[in-house]
Amino acid sequence: MSGVFILEQKITAMETVDSNELEHHYQNERWRFTASMIILILTAVTSVILACSIGRIEIPFSVVIKCLASGVGLIHDETLDLMQKAIIFDVRLSRVCLSAMVGLALAVSGAAFQGILRNPLADPFTIGVSAGGAFGAALIIFLGLGSKTAWGLGLAPLAALMGALSALAAVISLARVDGILRRDTMVLAGIVVATFLGALVSLLKSLDEESVASIVFWVMGSFQGRGWSHAIFAFPYLVAGLILVVIYSREIDLMSLGDFPARQLGVDTNKARAMVLIGASLLTAAAVSVSGVIGFVGLVAPHLVRMSVGPNHLRLFVLAGLLGMIAMIWSDVAARIILPEGEELPVGVITALIGGPFFCVLLKGAKTGTGFD
Amino acid sequence: MIEIENIVAGYQDQEVLKGISLKIIHNEMIGILGPNGSGKTTLIMALTGVVPIRSGQILLDGKPVRTYPTKEMAKRVACVPQKSEISFDFTNLSIVLMGRYPYLDSWAGYSKEDRDLAKDAMRQTGILKLAQKSIKRVSGGESQLVTIARAIAQTTEILILDEATSNLDAAKKIQVFDLLTKKNHEGATVICVLHDLNLAALYCKRLVFLKDGKVVIDGQTQDVFKDSVLSEIYETDIRVSEHPVTGTPQAHFVPFCNVLDSGDSFCRNKFGRVN
């Protein structure tokens, strides 16, 4: 009897050590997240400055920093070249900020779609939501309502949002078999819807020769000729979408257990799913309405982050969002400068060329590490 | 107290529960048994409010289950589902921590207290050493222990287990049921759905047998755990004898055809032994 008792005591002592170790581990994980976040923020800021200095007219790094500093009122320097200042503020910075916003929106919406649909291949591009947004915006522009506003907001992003949500609804209803959303059919349905809508966009554009934006703009995505007005345009949608998915990030965590277990743990699953889908569609619409359809950022960034810091969705949104920003800033820089004649490449070409093979390596290299079965 | 009054429930065009009435009083340890497809899991789903009922009602402490907000319900009833498919590789500790979700304020994260409760639950089920491992890298049995720990971390007065120990080895089954008995002594109401007749008879004071979506028999274990009752419900020959240590009834299954050690063989039909 006493033998058993001693054994029990030993086990308890051993497990107390375990418990402290776990607490230590937990704090370590937190530090790792914070450190990654700080590193990514610093990288993002540096990327913005570097991206402003690179271009057809090379502006030295130091001049960019001086210009930016004087722009936010940190220093007063009368010697700055007005032309360079104009290039940095009106042409480059606006475009860099816009691409950062789009990268953030796509990465976070990808992470949210993957989480809530429990599907590793879900992202705004693969499930047809981007194509829906592009179609909505293209239709409004075709009808000549592109510059109109409603309730103080531009009609084109609103139409992009409606298009994105309708495409999502279509994909979900197509993918539903016997009332259950199947993971494999979801991507198939997405491809069908995306291809169909892509064809419609092409049709609209060929019917409307006068439209300034080219078909390529909508199909492959580009930031050419985009500026502050577009950034301001997309901003409210971006913020609203981010708030929605962040608020429900813990619910997404629980819903990865499945619907019934999540409900048994107290999650209002229908409400959470609706909110996250709307939030992620808002983010997609914000991105698509200013940049067209850009693929792979929403797929690769969340996967990379999940592999290194785990699947916690709040952390995933923060880190994948930052990573998406950085990736998109540099993709756009590449799109601007890669052709020798000064012509631009659609940025979607760059993201697909880099993201495609990269994603294959991710899938091949870490079959379990991607976090999905 | 849970009062189930003549409920009908099912999925799409299929009616699984066809009028079930059951009263479960506070601090009971009750086993729900029955052949495959008899409606055990659906009953649990209806009870936890995740499958809607078509008629009848389920009252929890006098109030219909569907009127409870989901979080309130999760503070009262914890459920260990039959199978869990988790789509991301969370650590086992974070899975167990999810049991604390109903207690969280909307903006707050899991506190130190939540983490301590989760770790304590893992210690009780004997899986603390797996805390940092991914849920994707543990065995089927271990992942069941993780889910049981999650339900314990939920600190509810009612614990429901749906085939929660089906993948565990014999020793771990006993450990889990000892733990459930302890929780029951501490005041919890324990409802377990089981296929293991002997485990049910060993630990549950009351047994409810379901068949074809109806309650066939409901009573104290020593009253209902009988040759005739079991044989009729499972449509196979089952004999009951006394457990050598605890004295509780235990079931023995008789094969249809068998070769005995003596070299003789015997066969029986549905109604008993023929030769």
Image (spheres, coloured by chain):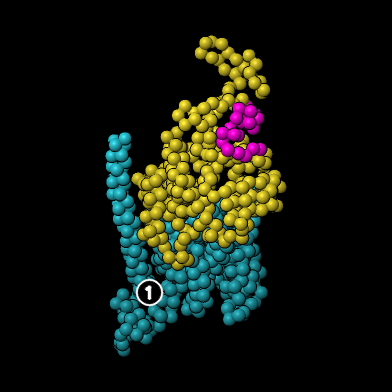
Please provide percent x and percent y for residue A307.
40, 53
Q: Quick one: label 1, few (<14), some, or many (20+) residues within 10 Å?
A: many
Seen from this angle, which residue lies furthest top? B263
Of the pair A61 and A317, the residue shown nearer to us: A317
Task: Please give the name of the residue rendered at 55% of the width and 57% of the height, measured from the top-left corner.
Answer: B73
**Magenta includes A68?**
no
Residue B112 in the image, given as x and y percentages of width and height: 36, 59
Task: Answer whether residue B227 is magenta in the image.
Answer: yes
| Depicted A240 relative to depicted A200: above or below | below
At 56% from the left and 36% from the top, the residue drawn is: B221
Residue A185 x, y percent position in the rendering: 59, 50
Q: Chain of mark 1?
A: A
Instruction: Please report the residue visible at 29 percent of the width from the left and 77 percent of the height from the top.
Output: A62
The chain coloured yellow in the image: B
Q: Is residue B193 above or below residue A238?
A: above
The answer to which of A222 and A169 lies nearer the viewer is A169
Q: Considering only vertical position in the picture, is B136 above or below A220?
A: above
- Secondary structure found at label 1: helix
Q: Can residue B216 be seen?
A: yes
Which contiguous range is marked in magenta? B216-236
In the figure, what tint was chain A given?
cyan
Three-letter code, disc 1: Cys
Q: Is residue A189 visible?
A: no
Say whether residue B110 is left or right of residue A63: right
| Residue located beneath label 1 in the image | A52
